[in-house]
Image (cartoon, rainbow, N blue to C red):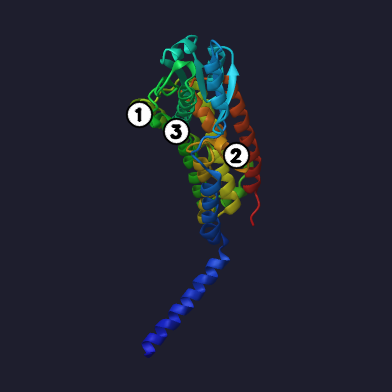
């Protein structure tokens, strides 16, 4: 090997050795390089699923009959469904509106007579807020009911023969056209509030730590709480402008209805924005480095809001450990609330419960953030 080639190899080896040592010393790089892929593999492989399991379904039978009982028994035999008998359609509609059931199976008064005449009709009403889950559930219900009654036909019960004797009449509530845009656009409000709040704020404030501009405030009479509130104010305005953009786009561009109280939407969105901002301030104060702040913000705010809040996956179909972890994420509570306010209407009990949880997060993060911006130089 020539002297030139030997020198190249030596320099390259020295540089690679230096970069390897630097990478090992920077734990944040190792965290992103190894733990993040592992977390994604386990989360997508074991934790998240588009399948529907044990979906609560209200069953209304106006006139009991042998065929009607077989329909119910067919639903009970499916691991994907959890049927619940109710006496009236009004009661079932109330459960569907409160989100305690995902669908209604209604066997009308003339079901037995129409079945005997080879014209059986079953009504299915689905909660269309989550269009993916609703479509999957509709397929499960239709398949279960059709197979149950076709088995009776095959056995010759009721004097019937052949298949195709059941008519399934389906209807989607809260999302009549089963439009996935109606399902996605409210969730985008959560993601945008998270991006503007935690991710953006953590970067900008960490930059001040790196430049020393924030430390210059420590020689002034201002208190840590006043610094926190001053940092919140500009980004609250930015977040509210983004919220207004989302609402206008939802109505004008995508024709997504806002059936709930606009006041409830504004109040809950502002509370979630404050939580996201405080989370970003806490991350920036704890890391005091833009690169580290961006990684921590990505792992603790944006990714959980994307994958664990119910934006894409139905949280009732995930393992119990993932479901518990999802309940710790503030975005989970806001996601459920904002979708309900957009598509179903105002459930003041849900508004009060979700805002109380967000308020508790805001109080906790305020206390933590005050400690990270205390008047002490490290």
At 37% from the left and 87% from the top, the residue drawn is: 4
- Name the mark on residue 343: none
Q: Mark 3 points at which residue?
A: 132
Distance CA(mark 1)–CA(mark 2): 31 Å
Q: Where is residue 345 in the image (x, y as percent from the top left)?
A: 49, 20
Q: Quadrant of residue 26?
A: bottom right
Badge 2 or badge 3: first in the primary sequence: 3
Mark 1 touching mark 2, by CB under 8 A? Answer: no
Given residues 131 and 305, the one toward you in this image is 131
On the image, numbered disc 2 is attached to which residue? 323
Position of residue 120 measured from the top left corner of the image (x, y, whole percent): 44, 16
**Which element type, helix, strand or loop, lies under badge 3?**
helix
Looking at the figure, which quarter contains the N terminus? bottom left
Q: Distance between the residues labelled 1 and 3?
A: 18 Å
Quadrant occupied by the C terminus: bottom right
Q: Mark 1 points at which residue?
A: 254
What kind of element bears circle 2?
helix
Q: Residues within 10 Å of mark 1 (few under 14, many from 20)?
A: few
Element at label 1: loop
Direction bottom: furthest residue: 2
């Amino acid at each position: 090997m020539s002297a030139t080639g030997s020198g190249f190899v030596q320099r390259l080896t020295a540089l690679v050795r230096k970069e390897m040592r630097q990478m090992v010393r920077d734990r944040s790089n190792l965290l992103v390089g190894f733990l993040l892929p592992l977390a994604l593999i386990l989360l997508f492989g074991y934790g998240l699923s588009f399948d529907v399991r044990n979906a609560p379904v209200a069953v209304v039978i106006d006139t009991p009959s042998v065929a009607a009982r077989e329909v119910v028994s067919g639903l009970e035999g499916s691991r994907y469904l959890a049927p619940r008998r109710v006496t009236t359609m009004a009661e079932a509609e109330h459960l569907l509106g409160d989100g305690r059931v995902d669908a209604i199976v209604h066997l009308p008064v003339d079901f037995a007579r129409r079945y005997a005449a080879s014209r059986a009709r079953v009504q299915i009403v689905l909660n269309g807020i989550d269009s993916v889950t609703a479509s999957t559930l509709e397929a499960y219900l239709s398949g279960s009911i059709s197979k149950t009654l076709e088995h009776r036909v095959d056995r010759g019960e009721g004097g019937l023969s052949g298949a195709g004797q059941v008519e399934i009449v389906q209807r989607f509530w809260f999302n009549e056209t089963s439009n996935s845009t109606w399902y996605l656009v409210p969730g985008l409000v959560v993601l945008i509030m998270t991006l503007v709040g935690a991710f953006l704020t953590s970067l900008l404030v960490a930059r001040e730590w790196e430049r020393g501009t924030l430390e210059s405030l420590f020689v002034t009479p201002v208190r840590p709480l006043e610094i926190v509130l001053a940092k919140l104010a500009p980004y609250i305005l930015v977040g509210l402008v983004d919220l207004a953009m989302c609402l206008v786009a939802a109505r004008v561009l995508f024709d997504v209805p806002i059936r709930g109280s606009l006041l409830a939407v504004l109040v809950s969105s502002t509370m979630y924005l404050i939580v996201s901002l405080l989370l970003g301030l806490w991350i920036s104060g704890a890391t005091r480095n833009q690169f580290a702040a961006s990684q921590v913000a990505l792992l603790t705010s944006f990714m959980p809001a994307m994958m664990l809040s119910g934006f894409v996956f139905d949280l009732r179909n995930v393992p119990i450990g993932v479901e518990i972890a999802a309940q710790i994420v503030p975005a989970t509570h806001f996601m459920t609330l904002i979708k309900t306010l957009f598509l179903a209407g105002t459930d003041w009990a849900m508004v009060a419960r979700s805002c109380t949880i967000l308020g508790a997060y805001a109080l906790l993060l305020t206390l933590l953030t005050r400690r990270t911006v205390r008047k002490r130089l490290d």
